[in-house]
Amino acid sequence: MHLEESLTSPDDLDEAVAVFVHHRRRLFGIAYRMLGSAVEAEDVVQEVWLRWQMTDRSVVVNPVAFLSSATTRLAINVAQSARVRRETYIGPWLPEPVDTSADPEVGAQRAEALELALLLVLERLNPVERAAYVLREAFDYAYAEIADMLELSLVNVRKIVSRARRHLLDEQRGSVDVAEHRRLLDAFVSAARKGEVASLEALLTPDAVSLSDGNGMRGCARVPVLGRDRVARLSTYRQLWKGAVPELVDANGVTGVMVSRDDRPLAFMTVAASKDGIHQVMWVFSPGKIAAFLDSRRRFGVLPGAVPDGV
């Protein structure tokens, strides 16, 4: 079948749509883990869909390999330009949280590779290292498959993944299970709302850090706040909690909190914790990122047209 025929045949287009829809969550999952942005990941997936439409699919032996490869390469390009843009970001940058209540894994084999704290650490890898790590650790691709996607030798890919693992091990701490994470988060929010600084300090590790992502918004800390006592005092900020209603939400495979006032979302927050307590508090105040989180559930559905609008 010629390309022109494949583009005009309704049956062929229906099959192309079916294949793409079947793998779409996986494609979004790859791009999102590489970029830390649901919006940028969705842009990548839409571009992959356009390329899939224009491809002579009769010569594609393995559609999922083709789609995964296209997604990975496009995400690497976006990640390279995103690094430059983030150099001008005002204050700490945090990944956009995504609602995972509909699909906790967002297309991954290993959901733990989705947590916000890990995505933040992944930012310290270069885009190719990040791609190799995500494909191997989150989606369990074989080294040979990753080598084909990245157009690298098998030996090189093994070295890249091994180097990325070592780097992340140096940066990460052991994490608690989902139930304990939620217990600590509940206790943290309760104490913060009541202004109980001592109770908060008891939940935090001595070297706890608070990160506030507001890209220069007034009232947001523009540098990381370090130390148990300072993090505890900051977290009880009256202007934040006055009249505010916290709602527990599923975000990135664990529990987070959406803080609203008068039905208007103000902030998203979550924590990273080990057996020693909460060591990282992450606040997202950026309106665009909060809007992206609220919109992320829509991405699991189907919009009018041939292809659903991404997970």
Image (tube, rainbow, N blue to C red):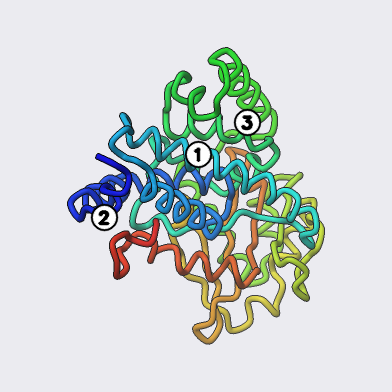
User: Which residue shows up at 53% across the image and 44% down it?
Assistant: 33
Quarter in which the C terminus is drawn: bottom left
Q: CA distance from mark 1 to mark 3?
A: 15 Å
User: Does dot 3 land on a helix, a strand or a loop?
Assistant: helix
- Where does residue 34 sit, x and y in percent of width and height? 57, 43
81 above or below 232?
above
Q: Residue at x 69, y 69 (%)?
A: 236
Residue type, label 3: Glu
Query: For the residue labelled by badge 2, is the local secondary structure a helix, a strand or a loop?
Result: helix
Q: Nearer the viewer, residue 196 or 303?
A: 303
> Closer to the observer: label 2 or label 1?
2
What numbered label is drawn on residue 129?
3
Please, what secondary structure does the residue beneath circle 1 have?
Answer: helix
- The image quadrant of residue 299 is bottom left
Judging by the rendered image, the residue that carries numbered circle 1 is 113
| Type of amino acid under label 2 | Thr
Q: Residues within 10 Å of mark 1 (few under 14, many from 20)?
A: many
Q: What residue do we see at 59% from left, 65% from top?
A: 289
Q: Amino acid at mark 1?
A: Ala
